[in-house]
Image: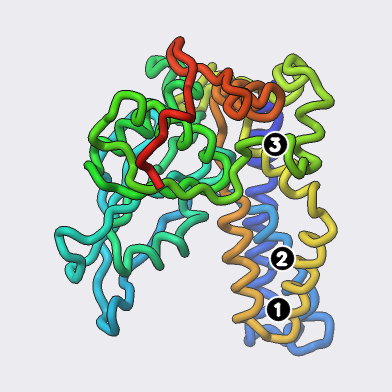
């Protein structure tokens, strides 16, 4: 019911966004005298800000066309090298890379945004390395016939991706995936898997959220797991391939993201409005580009989300030594030769 109501609201806002955009263009038309009055640019800018804020944004593209490697401009190729229902493995490279260049697996967060948030990281790293990145699926686009997806599956995917990249790869986990990436490394180390990562870098990951807790950590500890199940889980409506799937909707995640820094977001839009009025289009476009990426969100499968809340934020299973994968306790002490 909640998801369906949101979709109705979104369709109305899309129409309003379209009309606001048309109005802004009309008021900016040099053929109309009203555009030369003091009120013209102000009204046009206000409508443009509203049109941008109320528009619907789908999955962005990486659009990395070229990089400068050792002073030479090289064209970048992007390819799906492994396809799975819940996520693809993308490979970025350019002709100047040697066959034995370092291979880096970037594990993008499965936390509401798309992997393109790491576009800048990919662009910089591909200058000197074969870059692979996880491109997680939007849960509302995955049919029920593909089954569930939870933390066990997430770890299995990482192992499969590392196997595809091959022995001697480096793994970089950005924020949320630090826990499954560390667990996958320990599991592969336990079996002396030949494709276990040579190095593992974890950036800002919630390995032990009891250390330096944030407001998000506090909320997870203050509420029982059932509260999250009943409050933030919704059913995907009929118009999507994943109809009937239980998810943590992207629009609810975005609302949470925005509310944490609502004042800053409002100020950013006010500055965008002022830039538009002043004709500083380049500055306004920078804000637009950021929010087009920021507002592009995806749903999380309910089982994965609830397990993450329980084992990462409530029980702290990995640092406590009680984290289980496929019925077996994950022993971090098995990691011996991954730097």
Does residue 265 lie above or below 58 as drawn?
A: below
Labelled disc at residue 115: none
Q: Position of residue 316 (x, y in %)?
A: 66, 26
Q: Pointer 1: residues within 10 angstroms few (<14), some, or many (20+)?
A: many
Q: Residue at x 26, y 47 (%)?
A: 168
> Which of these two is toward me, 287 or 6?
287
Residue with the most extreme top position: 327
- Depth check, mark 2 against mark 3: the one in front is 3
Q: Residue at x 39, y 26 (%)?
A: 187
Give left or right: position of 287 versus 67: right
Q: Which residue is mark 3?
A: 209
Q: Pointer 2: residues within 10 angstroms few (<14), some, or many (20+)?
A: many
Does residue 72 lie above or below 21 as drawn?
A: below
| Residue 127 shows in this picture | yes
Q: Position of residue 282 (x, y in %)?
A: 60, 81
* Secondary element at tag 1: helix
Q: Which residue is mark 2?
A: 49
Q: Position of residue 279 (x, y in %)?
A: 68, 86
Q: Which residue is mark 1?
A: 276
Q: How many marks?
A: 3
Which quarter of the rendered picture does the N terminus lie within?
top right
Does residue 172 lie above or below 209 as drawn?
A: below
* Secondary element at tag 3: loop
**Residues at marks 2 and 1 touching, judged by CB atoms closer than 8 Å:** yes
């Amino acid at each position: 019911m909640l998801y369906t109501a949101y979709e109705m609201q979104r369709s109305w806002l899309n129409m309003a966004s379209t009309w606001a955009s048309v109005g802004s263009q009309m008021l900016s038309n040099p053929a109309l005298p009203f555009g030369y009055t003091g009120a013209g640019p102000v009204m046009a800018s206000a409508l443009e800000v509203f049109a941008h804020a109320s528009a619907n944004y789908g999955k962005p593209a990486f659009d990395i066309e070229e990089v400068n490697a050792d002073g030479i401009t090289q064209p970048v190729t992007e390819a799906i090298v492994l396809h799975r229902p819940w996520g693809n493995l993308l490979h970025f490279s350019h002709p100047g890379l040697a066959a034995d260049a370092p291979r880096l697996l970037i594990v993008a967060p499965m936390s509401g945004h798309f992997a393109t948030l790491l576009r800048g990281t990919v662009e910089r790293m591909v200058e000197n390395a074969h870059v692979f990145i996880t491109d997680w699926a939007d849960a509302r686009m995955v049919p029920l016939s593909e089954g569930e997806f939870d933390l066990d599956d997430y770890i299995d995917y990482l192992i499969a991706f590392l196997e595809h990249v091959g022995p001697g790869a480096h793994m970089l986990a950005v924020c949320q995936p630090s826990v499954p990436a560390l667990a996958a490394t320990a599991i592969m180390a336990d079996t002396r898997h030949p494709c276990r990562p040579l190095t593992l870098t974890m950036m800002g990951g919630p390995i032990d959220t009891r250390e330096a807790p944030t407001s998000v950590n506090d909320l997870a500890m203050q509420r029982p797991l059932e509260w999250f199940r009943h409050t933030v889980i919704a059913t995907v409506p009929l118009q999507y391939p994943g109809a009937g799937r239980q998810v943590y909707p992207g629009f609810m995640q975005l609302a949470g993201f925005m509310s944490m820094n609502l004042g800053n977001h409002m100020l950013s839009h006010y500055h965008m409005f002022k830039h538009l009025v002043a004709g500083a289009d380049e500055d306004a476009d920078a804000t637009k580009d950021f929010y087009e990426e920021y507002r592009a969100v995806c749903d999380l499968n309910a089982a994965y989300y609830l397990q993450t809340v329980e084992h990462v934020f409530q029980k702290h299973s990995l640092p406590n030594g009680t984290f289980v994968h496929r019925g077996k306790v994950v022993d971090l002490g098995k990691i011996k030769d991954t730097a």
